[in-house]
Amino acid sequence: MLDLAEIRRYAQTYFAESTGCHGWDHTERVLALARRIARVEGADLAVVSAAALLHDIGRREESASNGTCCHAARGAEIACQFLSSQAVPPEIIQRIVHCIAAHRFRNSLAPESLEARILFDADKLDSIGAVGIGRAFQFAGEVGARLHDPAVDPANSRPYSMEDTAYREYLVKLRYLKDRMLTATGRRLAAERSAFMDTFFTRLNDEVAGVR
Amino acid sequence: MLDLAEIRRYAQTYFAESTGCHGWDHTERVLALARRIARVEGADLAVVSAAALLHDIGRREESASNGTCCHAARGAEIACQFLSSQAVPPEIIQRIVHCIAAHRFRNSLAPESLEARILFDADKLDSIGAVGIGRAFQFAGEVGARLHDPAVDPANSRPYSMEDTAYREYLVKLRYLKDRMLTATGRRLAAERSAFMDTFFTRLNDEVAGVR
């Protein structure tokens, strides 16, 4: 009923390359995580997989619009059109589209189904742990930020600047993500990943001070 | 005899900003580490500190020359001129200059004094551990590389390319640095930092596969 290979092929056309924080590699990681969580939570694996593959196809338009277009809402719209053309039953389309529309962290739209909560968790999990650390430093490199500033003041520093270190991102956002999870499996994975980030940044501060 | 504040002021003029893998922040971290090791090893703290502050002042010319100028040799030369103008005794100048000339990993010039071995170790230590992980991802971001490729083949991938992930750098170089240390304290710190890197990349591969 849902041809995941065809959905992957279609979704990939919205990604020029694999680099960047929300590139195609991110989608593949979210897919692997979402399927892992879905199995444990007893969710609909096909719906979760389709939603994960399609969840960021609205990113390109959000970037082109300088953020005025919401990638979750736009992605839901594009996905709806595509799935309709693939003769997917309306009830299934609706379930997939809700996952995409409600996956955004800052959205007012709350995930209402188990599958939507799973996609939300999988997407957030990719920002923390070892992957989250790598992404934060890679992003800092892309915007020309500084490697580290142990004395950064989150309240008096700006994102996308020389003060925008990976450590700043950890202090203002990443370390709190574990408290936003919506499934028990997501919470468990987030707790482990978050503890590892805590260990990493404690060690980083020690190393930079020359004491470790 | 050695005015470290004046040496720091002078060395800093060779660094436009704090970003980049070998920016001024790297010098401050190497200084902190070198002093830490020097205290344990009973080395001359003033010589080690001066050499650490000056060790990368030849970097700018190496970059401008596309690598034909060796930053260690050129840095030694500039440092020698500067220290002579500061009325530092020739014997001290010689000891500082040897540290700078011999700190390079790929150099054929071996560090012959305790102070030179300490600078060598401190410089290499800044490439591994949590700092090394951050630097590797930040560099990947700067050159537009990919976040991760668990299946990268070090033998069939090129540096400075989309295949040049932090993980590739770890596989081909970073994990072996611990075996190149020249002091007992350096070896101990490197073993700890290296073990943490191993933990990090094992976890990264697990997270990317969705199993953690």
Image (tube, coloured by chain):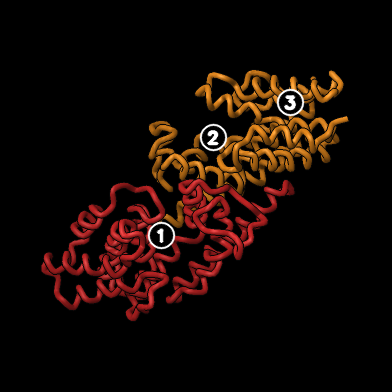
Chain colours: A red, B orange
Q: Answer with mark 1 or mark 2, whichever residue precedes in sequence.
A: 2
Q: Label 1 neighbourhood size at 10 Å, few (<14), some (14-19), many (20+)?
A: many
Which label belongs to residue B210? 1
- Share a chain, discs 2 and 3? yes
Dot 1 amino acid type: Gly
Determine crowd level at label 2: few under 14, some 14-19, many 20+ residues with C-alpha closer than 10 A.
few
Q: Is residue A66 left or right of residue B205?
A: left
Q: Are marks 1 and 3 on the same chain?
A: yes
Residue type at the position of mark 3: Cys
Badge 2 is on which residue? B173
Q: Position of residue B45 (x, y in %)?
A: 83, 35
Q: Are marks 2 and 3 in contact (CB under 8 Å)?
A: no
Numbered disc 1: secondary structure: loop
**Nearer the camera: disc 1 or disc 3:** 3
Residue B202 in view of the camera: no
Residue A146 sits above or below residue B110 on the image: below
C-beta proximity under 8 Å, tags 1 and 3: no
Q: Which residue is mark 3?
A: B99
Question: The residue tagged with tag 2: helix, strand or loop?
Answer: loop
Residue B182 lies, with reference to residue A112, above or below; the image says above
